[in-house]
Structures are given as structure tokens and as C-alpha cells.
Image: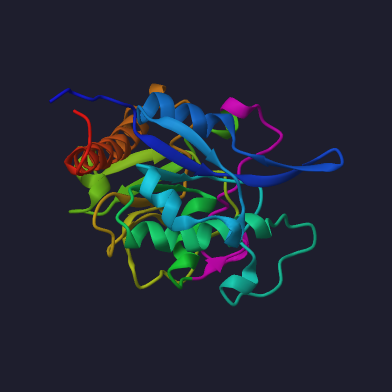
């Protein structure tokens, strides 16, 4: 039988942005680069079609999903939160796409990595809630970046991170403590029942989670490991594990196709 090696196909749901007079479906370049260089995958941008997206058909074709960060926030009505402050960016088309897609990905054992807005979507999709302004909660740190600083400074290490013993992240990294960047105002408030904590910031804010009902790789991460991924060994370990899970799914799908009657070797 012929040997087949291929990059796993990894879908990245898009945000909707108004550019000029037209809406565009967009994904940040750093996420695309991290999928290709960190996970060894083939990035595929997925339009935010909401109910117009055939999730089952999509999940039969992709080997993994990366839910990215975004300037927009999950609409608070979706988790019973108070109205957002004036000027807060929202993206209802993305919400309508990602939340049901996350639930479907868990059901169909599709590997997924959820970053920043992505971890918040994961928590909301499974019934959790969010703090809209962590810096206004007594006892919590200000997790926002200083937007007056150059981009490299904004994405530089900002605080320590404690990995939960016995977790998936702890299995990837030998040290219990690691420093990460911090560029978010929102964060997990009530943790969804289907999630287990993987890491916390020094103030106790949940920084990483694992979907316990998922059959395979399903992590949510609040910081930004995609930033200059190849320069950060911890980030590379995360993306490499995600890529390996996606490759395993791709190999399984290839074997399944070859086993079908009439398949060509």
C-alpha cells in the first residue's frame, strides 16, 4: 500500500471586520503562522457563517481547529452577564459560529486549541461565565497590555503561571512555573462543568483549561502562545502537541478512506 504523508488540515474560524464600506472575514497572521510553523499544519480560514456553516460536513474534513484571540468579546447575553461597557467590540457572527462549533468538535473528537477569546468561547459554550473587566475585580491583577508600548513589549512576559500537577500542560513542560504574556481584559469567572483547570495566574485567574469530555486534545489558553511561536520552547511544546493530535486524526481518516470499498492504494 502506498504511504501517504500530508500536513493536517487545521481550520481557523474568522472574525468579521468592517474595512471601508464592506465586511471582511479575517484571521490574524500570527495564528496562521503558528499553525504552519508550530503545529506543522495546513491553515484553512473558516468564514463566520453561523447557522449557515455545515458543522458536520466541516468536521468530517478538518483534522483540528484553532479558535483565535480577537479585539471583540463574547456577547454577555450568551452567558447571562450584564451589558458591556459602551464601546466594547462584539462579533455576533463569530459567536454564532464558534460556540456551536466548539460543542460539535468535542462531540466528534476533533482536536482543538482555543486561545484568548477562544478559551472564553470554550467556557461559555459549555455553560460557564466571564468577568468582563478583570482589573475591576478586587484582588485581581490588571491583565491588560500597555497599548502605548511597542508590539514586542506588549507581547513580552508579564506574569508567572502555575501549571496544575497531573494536567496536560504539566505533561508537556518539566517546570511547574513558567512566565507568559498577558493581553486580555476579560477572563473566566465561573468555570464550566465540562472543564478542568490546567494553569492559573498568580492572582488565581484561570489561564488554561482542558475539556474533560473530549476524547483527545482540547485545550483553552488565555495568554498568546502563537506570538513568535518558534522562539518560545513552551509555546512550541503546546503547538507541537496540537499538531501531533491533528496528524493522528489525519492518519486515522486516511486509513478509514483506504478501507472503504473501491479505494485506491
Query: What are the residue bounds of the magenta stretch?
Result: 129-152
| Residue 35 is one of the magenta-drawn residues | no
> Which residue extends farthest front?
262
Residue 223, horizontal then vertical, whole percent: 47, 44
Q: Quadrant of the N terminus?
A: top left
Q: How is the image coloured?
A: rainbow
In the displayed structure, does residue 242 sit left or right of residue 252?
A: right
Residue at screen point 39% across, 38% down: 179
Q: Nearer the viewer, residue 54 or 119?
A: 54
Q: Quadrant of the C terminus?
A: top left
| Residue 149 is one of the magenta-drawn residues | yes
The correct choice, above or below, for 39 with respect to 140 in the image is above
Residue 183, horizontal then vertical, whole percent: 57, 44
Residue 122, horizontal then vertical, whole percent: 45, 60
Secondary structure predominantly adopted by residues drawn in magenta: loop
Residue at screen point 45% across, 73% down: 127
Residue at screen point 73% across, 57% down: 88
> Which residue extends farthest right?
21
Q: Nearer the viewer, residue 212 or 86?
A: 212
In the displayed structure, does residue 195 sit left or right of residue 50?
A: left
Q: How many marks?
A: 0
Residue at screen point 38% across, 30% down: 41
Amino acid at each position: 500500500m502506498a504511504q501517504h504523508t500530508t500536513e493536517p488540515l487545521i481550520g481557523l474560524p474568522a472574525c468579521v471586520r468592517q474595512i471601508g464600506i464592506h465586511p471582511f472575514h479575517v484571521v490574524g497572521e500570527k495564528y496562521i503562522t503558528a499553525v504552519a510553523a508550530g503545529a506543522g499544519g495546513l491553515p484553512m480560514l473558516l468564514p463566520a457563517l453561523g447557522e449557515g456553516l455545515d458543522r458536520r460536513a466541516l468536521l468530517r474534513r478538518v483534522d483540528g481547529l484553532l479558535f483565535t484571540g480577537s479585539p471583540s468579546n463574547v456577547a454577555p447575553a450568551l452567558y447571562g452577564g450584564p451589558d458591556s461597557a459602551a464601546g466594547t467590540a462584539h462579533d455576533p457572527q463569530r459567536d454564532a459560529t464558534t460556540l456551536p462549533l466548539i460543542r460539535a468538535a468535542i462531540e466528534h473528537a476533533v482536536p482543538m486549541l482555543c486561545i484568548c477569546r477562544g478559551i472564553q468561547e470554550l467556557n461559555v459554550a459549555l455553560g460557564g461565565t466571564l468577568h468582563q473587566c478583570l482589573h475591576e475585580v478586587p484582588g485581581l491583577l490588571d491583565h491588560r497590555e500597555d497599548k502605548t508600548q511597542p508590539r514586542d513589549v506588549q507581547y513580552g512576559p508579564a506574569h508567572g503561571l502555575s501549571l496544575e500537577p497531573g494536567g496536560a500542560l504539566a505533561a508537556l513542560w518539566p517546570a511547574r512555573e513558567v512566565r507568559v504574556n498577558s493581553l486580555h481584559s476579560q477572563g473566566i469567572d465561573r468555570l464550566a462543568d465540562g472543564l478542568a483547570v490546567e494553569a492559573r495566574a498568580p492572582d488565581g485567574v484561570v489561564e488554561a483549561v482542558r475539556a474533560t469530555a473530549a476524547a483527545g486534545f482540547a485545550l483553552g489558553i488565555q495568554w498568546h502562545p502563537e506570538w513568535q511561536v518558534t522562539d518560545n520552547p513552551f509555546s512550541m511544546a503546546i503547538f507541537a502537541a496540537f499538531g501531533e493530535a491533528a496528524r493522528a486524526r489525519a492518519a486515522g481518516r486516511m486509513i478509514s478512506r483506504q478501507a472503504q470499498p473501491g479505494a485506491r492504494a
